[in-house]
Amino acid sequence: MFRMVLMEYLDCCKLRSQIEALASQKLVNHPDYLHLQTIPGVGPVLALLILAEGGDLRRFSHYRKFLKYCGLDLCTEQSGKFKGISRLSKRGNGRLRYAFWLAATVAIRMKENSFRRKYDNYVKGDPNNSDLKRKAYTAVAAKVARVAYGLIKTGTDYRRFIEAVEPSGRIPSQLAVEAISTS
């Protein structure tokens, strides 16, 4: 039984590598495919899935419409004075939402990017709360979708957010003298 599971896993790995190779071969000159791969967490398969399920993202006039298409928008049930809680609508494309969710989980595990920072800021109040973690993953998935939309709409590559170190307020005296003399 374990041998069958192992064989199926190896077949899936071979299939994945074949899909990656075929996608890279066929879409080597496709600009949207190349722009999507610059996003942390998005590889050849996810870029292919986003393009296949989303189509031409330029057809959306605003990123909110794209998020609604993905099912990553918030909706609130309300009636009269009653206002319910906001939840994910999930009315959009499930495969596209899943692709952005996978990209978010990979991006969060990487160091030094704005996706990781968003996740950390979201869960810093209670890092052990699993419900808060799930909401943070969803927020990061929506951010990845917004970034993907923006990159394709503008035709640029992803530029990593450089996280600056807060200055201590002290400048060594020699550097301060040099800075004043050069200006």
Image (cartoon, helix red, strand yellow):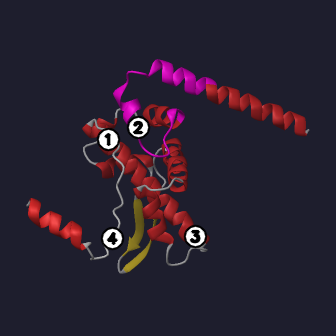
Above or below residue 32? Residue 166 is below
Q: Earlier in the sequence, mark 1 or mark 3?
A: 3
Could you tell me the amino acid type at mark 2?
Leu
Kindly identify the residue that appears in the image at 26 percent across and 48 percent down.
62
Q: Is the C-beta separation of discs 2 and 1 under 8 Å?
A: yes
| Residue 27: image location, x then y, percent | 44, 22
Q: Is the C-beta separation of discs 1 and 4 under 8 Å?
A: no
Q: Which residue is mark 2?
A: 36
Q: Which residue is mark 1?
A: 151
Dot in front, 4 or 3 = 4
| Residue 34: image location, x then y, percent | 39, 31
Q: Is residue 43 rendered magenta in the image?
A: yes
Local secondary structure at mark 3: helix
Q: Which residue is mark 4?
A: 166
Between 24 and 84, the residue placed more toward the observer is 24
Picture quadrant where residue 38 is located: top left
**What range is drawn magenta here?**
18-45
